[in-house]
Amino acid sequence: MDTDDFSEMAWSVIVQAAEISDTLKSEIGAMSCNYKNEDDWLRGIQAHLLEIIEDPIEYLDYWNLEKEEGVTVLKISDLGSGLYRYVDEVLSTPLIKRGNSRL
């Protein structure tokens, strides 16, 4: 799936990630090519966010985010938790009510 095919609500996940970390934004955007549809991608994103929530220090260290982007453990934890909840909201919204795709 291409990110251009995402609904407005799904695209918002990427936009929200970009507010804190360009790395996370790029990472979850690139993950879209591994999924056939928006809901599968959203569930994949949730699994990835859960890994970040469970061990934010490992995620920060892996990407060197404190040095490269000034992202702290608190910021990435808050972002991961907030995005996880938002993805729940998107998944509970029927696709037809999520807004048009970007194209």
Image (spheres, rainbow, N blue to C red):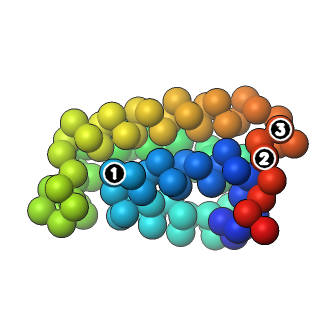
Q: Which mark is residue 20?
A: 1
41 vs 81: above or below: below
For the residue marked with disc 2, what is the amino acid?
A: Gly
* Quadrant where the image shows the N terminus: bottom right
Please report contact status of discs 3 and 2: CB closer than 8 Å, yes or no: yes
Q: CA distance from mark 2 to mark 1?
A: 24 Å
Q: Nearer the viewer, residue 17 or 64?
A: 17
Q: Find numbered disc 1 in the image and state the secondary structure of the residue it sits on.
A: loop
Residue 2 figure quarter: bottom right
For the residue marked with disc 3, what is the amino acid?
A: Lys
The reply to whether residue 78 is in sight is yes
The image shows a total of numbered marks equal to 3
Expressed as whole percent of the image width and height from the top left, the position of residue 62 reads 23, 61
* Quadrant where the image shows the C terminus: bottom right
89 vs 62: above or below: above
Decide which of tag 3 and tag 1 comes sooner along the chain: 1
Q: Residue at x 52, y 55 (%)?
A: 14
Q: Which mark is residue 99?
A: 2
Q: In the visual, does 72 lie left or right of 30?
A: left
For the residue carrying disc 2, how many other residues have a C-alpha within 10 Å: few (<14), some (14-19), or many (20+)? Answer: some
Q: Find numbered disc 2 in the image and state the secondary structure of the residue it sits on.
A: loop
For the residue marked with disc 1, what is the amino acid?
A: Ile
Please name the residue that numbered disc 3 is placed on.
Answer: 97
For the residue carrying disc 3, how many other residues have a C-alpha within 10 Å: few (<14), some (14-19), or many (20+)? Answer: few
Q: Find numbered disc 3 in the image and state the secondary structure of the residue it sits on.
A: helix
